[in-house]
Image: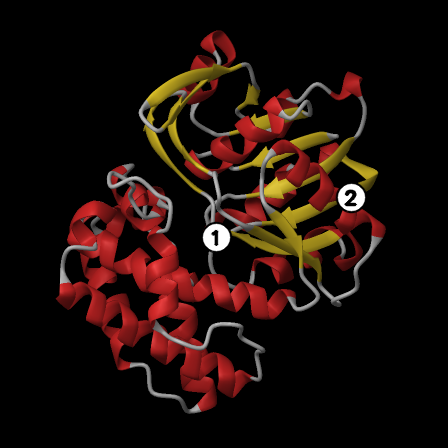
Amino acid sequence: MKIVVLGAGALGCALGSVLTEGGHEVWLVNRGRAHVDTMNQYGLKVREKGVDRYVKVHAATTCAGIDMRTGDVDLIIVLVKSFHTQEAIASAKPILGQDTVVLSLQNGLGHEDILAEAVGQERVLAGKTYAGGVLIGAGHIIGGTQGKDTHIGELNGEVTPRVTRIAEVFNQAGLLTYVSKNIMGTMWDKLLVNVATGALSGITRLTYGELYKLPEVEACAVAAVAEAMAVGKAKGVALTVTDPHQPWVKAAAGLPAEFKASMLQSLEKGSVTEIDFVNGAVVRWGAKLGVPTPVNQTLVACMKGVERGLFPMTDMKEAA
């Protein structure tokens, strides 16, 4: 299968390395020239359990750099930051073949609507992954895919040959993947995990090893998840999570102590976070449905303050 990872940061590279080692032609697209040049020259260095290995990958700074002589792209995995979704999918239109499928594995909610408007709903699959990664430096990541599940599905809940085939490809490569008949419920389940740790990691600047030592942080995380669950239920979402403590536990399962949530990674790379699409989504839906969300409102406010401190108003657009 020919696969393009659109937004090959830490997670995109982690997934891409596994799929490459599974025998597929994978292209990692990232705007960072140094990151791309390093991967093309030396390979992608992946650290797992303290051991580094090199994976020979294809990398490009734009979709224009993808070699189309090897055939049409079968699958585009979208992993750009939420606020770059529209721009990114527009840049990918030249590589869309007749049967190219577009799969969002981004954090938060609403990306599938943006993608469907850009390329047509019939092309779009939605999904969530609990895999992770940490970017150490140009062309060097800590992988976090082992034992972490991924869920994908058609927007209408059908189990089609194409979504089944993609799941088979992922599983054969070593990515534990399930086809969901309730992808919106699945997406809300993943949202709960992001709500549990994303903002708190970014605000405190703590790695998971330190974050999980503080009972006060755990209490705040569980309260934020409980609010999100209440909003999801009011919206009619079929959640599989029954205990707000579960997402807090799941967020760190199998990950090394030095792991950092994506929001913290964004701040450290000089970028604003996806807070508006995670805790912010809970706040917006809560307001629409009449469900109070004071903990999430506080986390959003604190993160906005952190972003403003790091990126003054004149630099906010550039930092995105």
Q: Which residue does the image show at 31% across and 25% down from the upper left? A: 50
Q: Nearer the viewer, residue 68 or 107?
A: 107
Q: Position of residue 244 (x, y in %)?
A: 36, 74
Q: Secondary structure at mark 2?
A: helix
7 versus 299 height, above or below: above
Q: Position of residue 253 (x, y in %)?
A: 37, 51
Residue 96 numbered mark, or none: none
Which mark is first along the chain, 1 or 2? 1
Of all residues, the one furthest to the top in this rendering is 41
Q: Which residue is mark 2?
A: 165
304 versus 317 height, above or below: below
The N terminus, quarter of image: top right
Q: Which residue does the image show at 29% across and 41% down from the upper left? A: 259
Q: How many marks?
A: 2
Q: Which residue does the image show at 24% across and 41% down from the upper left? A: 257
Q: Position of residue 159 (x, y in %)?
A: 79, 60
Q: Which residue does the image show at 48% across and 53% down from the upper left? A: 82
